Image (cartoon, rainbow, N blue to C red):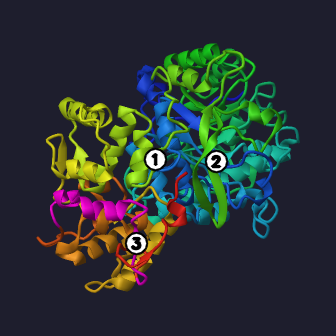
């Protein structure tokens, strides 16, 4: 067995870190014992199928792109919010099409305090028909991965100033390469293990090259390669230990690339020693971790942290097993934590694969999702009960992740952040008789009018009090949506209205909805030309920010937030506190609207104006303007905005 020598490893063990972003050197030591440093992850691959039917026709498996916002977005099923409510601090991802935009997902994760671990897809390694690195370039993946990772960087991984998005925690070079490239690496001969290692180190080299090409600045992102828990019999070391042989083979390839028939373009040793963490997947119980893996790993790899990318031992009580694995994470200086496998039952895999999953599907369709021109139902979630524990996995995970329990009571109820902002949507929330649900709806309406609830206990209590008054007040009157808008428009003390609020694109609707609204607004614009959109705003939602904010200004005294900044659900009149948290929005909105930019928010309180806009029975639209309100030809809400 070979350990990293002092000459190979300039970092003393006490200076290793579990964090990705401070530049070039980890800083771990005793800080790992702090629970806030532990990786509390959830593996997320939400295939929207209830069976194998349709699995082969699924257009993509990239579920952190904009097209999947009806699943992960808070206006849809709210998966990211549910992951946060499980007590997690990290989301581990799978599919990745670099041509897709991922800014919106990363922004939402960051707003919720979640970190993200994406990974390269299998496509360039062995699935691409004409140019994969297994069959076409002898396991040298530099060019294929460089080009694709460059797209990832340009499509959300980098902010406009060429810094890594703050939500990113690690980047997985490849999930389980020892089972894929080649698939016989663990059971084959030495050549096959070296082919696997060459694929991983050349891919890492390509990713570093993509960073260099684009001039990435600021805090760097750490990398990993997640191996299986198989025993690699020909990896050269640790032949009787799961995962360790694969890790050693990669380690050796980093330091001795010539022996693997590879010549790096970048300093792989520097990247490995300062920007790399090891990881593996396992279904073994926590009691196996130290004797099978961690004790030996610590002895031979004392300067590189490690985490488990998929963890769930279904044949053990989860209450006991998770408690033990969390204890190890709190106490061990190198073991960073786990990503619990997995968020949703994989119905499409069938068989034993369906034993994994914190949530199954409920019996209510939350939304319809146009996923790359194929329509899918987005089902509500139903907590899975652990057969050995007799309680829901959601409660078990939430308990071990430090938040006590998971509130599942509203999983299949109408979503206050997604229902239409009209009387029908309002009624669907009132019917729940829940002050917390109604409070969330009120907050949403307030945000649509450029306001936010003040961040103090008194204001938050006043919000709940307002909701309770609506639900249980002595007047016992039937509240109309117009009454609610009037109440918000009267500017109660617990709300803060932002003079810098702007009409921007709604991040919680799919990009095709925003795109349609952009097309209409550009065709109607009188004081601006959409050909002038800056290159840094060249992304559907940021184009919407640029166009909608200028169109709203153009309306001047005729504009009102709830009405004029709706665009069929594609727009929202957001405070600067909100839109400044959306990457690039601040540089795309109109900077200085004149004093006639629009009326006071209280103008939205006019009952006749508001109800004519928000009540579906009264909504009419001008035939020349499919997204504006008028009194001529009626139409329905656009398909992609419907909620069931």
Q: Is residue 97 magenta?
A: no
Q: For this rendering, which residue is in front, 403 or 157?
A: 403
Q: Are marks 1 and 3 in contact (CB under 8 Å)?
A: no
Q: Which residue is mark 1?
A: 74
Q: Which mark is residue 94?
A: 2
Q: CA distance from mark 1 to mark 3?
A: 28 Å
- Does 540 appear above or below 533? above
Q: CA distance from mark 2 to mark 3?
A: 43 Å
Q: Residue furthest left?
A: 595
What is the x, y in percent for residue 8? 57, 37
Q: Secondary structure at mark 3?
A: strand
In which quadrant will I find the N terminus?
Answer: top right
Q: Which mark is residue 620?
A: 3
Q: For this rendering, which residue is in front, 23 or 454?
A: 454
- Does 175 appear above or below 321? below
Residue at the location (80% across, 66% down)?
Answer: 136
Q: Which residues are magenta?
A: 599-624
Residue at the location (72% across, 41% down)?
Answer: 346
Is residue 324 visible from the viewing direction of this image?
A: yes
Q: CA distance from mark 1 to mark 2?
A: 21 Å
Q: Nearer the viewer, mark 1 or mark 2?
A: 1
Q: For this rendering, which residue is in front, 150 or 491?
A: 491
């Amino acid at each position: 067995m070979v350990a990293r020598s002092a000459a190979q490893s300039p970092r003393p063990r006490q200076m290793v870190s579990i964090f990705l972003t401070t530049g070039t050197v980890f800083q771990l030591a005793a800080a790992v014992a702090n629970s806030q440093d532990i990786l509390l992850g959830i593996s997320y691959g939400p295939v929207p199928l209830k069976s194998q039917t349709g699995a082969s026709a699924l257009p993509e498996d990239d579920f952190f792109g904009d097209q999947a916002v009806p699943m992960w977005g808070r206006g849809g099923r709210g998966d990211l919010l549910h992951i946060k409510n499980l007590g997690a601090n990290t989301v581990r991802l799978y599919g990745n099409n670099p041509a897709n935009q991922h800014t919106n997902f990363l922004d939402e994760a960051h707003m919720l305090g979640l970190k993200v671990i994406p990974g390269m897809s299998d496509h360039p390694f062995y699935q691409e028909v004409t140019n994969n690195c297994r069959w076409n370039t002898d396991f040298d993946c530099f060019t294929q991965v460089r080009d694709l990772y460059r797209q990832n960087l340009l499509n959300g991984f980098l902010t406009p100033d060429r810094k890594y998005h703050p939500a990113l925690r690690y980047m997985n070079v490849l999930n389980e390469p020892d089972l894929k490239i080649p698939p016989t690496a663990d059971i084959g001969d030495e050549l096959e293990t070296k082919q696997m290692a060459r694929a991983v180190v050349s891919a890492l080299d390509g990713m570093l090259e993509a960073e260099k090409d684009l001039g990435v600045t600021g805090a760097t992102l750490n990398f990993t390669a997640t191996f299986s828990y198989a025993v690699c019999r020909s990896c050269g070391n640790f032949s009787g230990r799961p995962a360790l042989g694969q890790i050693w083979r990669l380690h050796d390839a980093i330091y001795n690339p010539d022996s693997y028939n590879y010549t790096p373009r970048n300093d792989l040793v520097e990247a490995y020693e300062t920007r790399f963490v090891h990881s593996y997947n396992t279904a073994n119980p926590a009691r196996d971790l130290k004797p099978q893996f961690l004790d030996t790993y610590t002895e031979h790899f004392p300067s590189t942290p490690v985490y488990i990318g998929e963890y769930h031992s279904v044949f053990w009580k989860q209450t006991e097993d998770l408690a033990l694995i969390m204890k190890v994470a709190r106490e061990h200086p190198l073991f960073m934590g786990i990503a619990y496998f997995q968020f949703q039952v994989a119905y499409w895999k069938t068989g034993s694969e369906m034993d994994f999953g914190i949530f199954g599907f409920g019996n209510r369709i939350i939304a319809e999702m146009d996923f790359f021109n194929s329509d899918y139902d987005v089902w509500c979630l139903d907590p899975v009960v652990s057969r050995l524990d007799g309680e829901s996995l959601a409660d078990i995970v939430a308990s071990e992740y430090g938040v006590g329990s998971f509130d599942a009571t509203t999983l299949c109820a109408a979503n206050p952040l997604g229902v239409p902002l009209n009387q029908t949507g309002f009624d669907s929330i009132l019917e729940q008789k829940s002050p917390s649900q109604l409070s969330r709806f009120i907050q949403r309406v307030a945000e649509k009018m450029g306001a936010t609830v003040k961040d103090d206990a008194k204001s938050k209590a006043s919000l709940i009090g307002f909701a309770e008054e609506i639900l249980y007040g002595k007047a016992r009157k039937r509240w109309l949506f117009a009454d609610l808008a009037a109440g918000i428009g009267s500017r109660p003390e617990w709300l803060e209205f932002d003079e810098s609020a702007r009409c921007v694109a709604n991040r919680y609707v799919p990009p095709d909805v925003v795109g349609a609204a952009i097309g209409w607004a550009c065709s109607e614009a009188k004081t601006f030309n959409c050909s002038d959109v800056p290159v840094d705003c060249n992304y559907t939602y940021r184009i919407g920010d640029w166009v909608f904010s200028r169109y709203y200004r153009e309306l001047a005294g005729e504009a009102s937030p709830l009405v004029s900044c709706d665009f069929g659900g594609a727009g929202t009149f957001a405070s600067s506190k909100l839109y400044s948290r959306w990457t690039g929005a601040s540089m795309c909105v109109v900077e200085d609207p004149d004093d006639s930019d629009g009326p006071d928010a209280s103008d939205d309180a006019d009952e006749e104006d508001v109800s004519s806009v928000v009540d579906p029975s009264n909504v009419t639209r001008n035939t020349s303007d499919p997204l504006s309100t008028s009194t001529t030809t009626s139409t329905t809400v656009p398909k992609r905005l419907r909620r069931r």
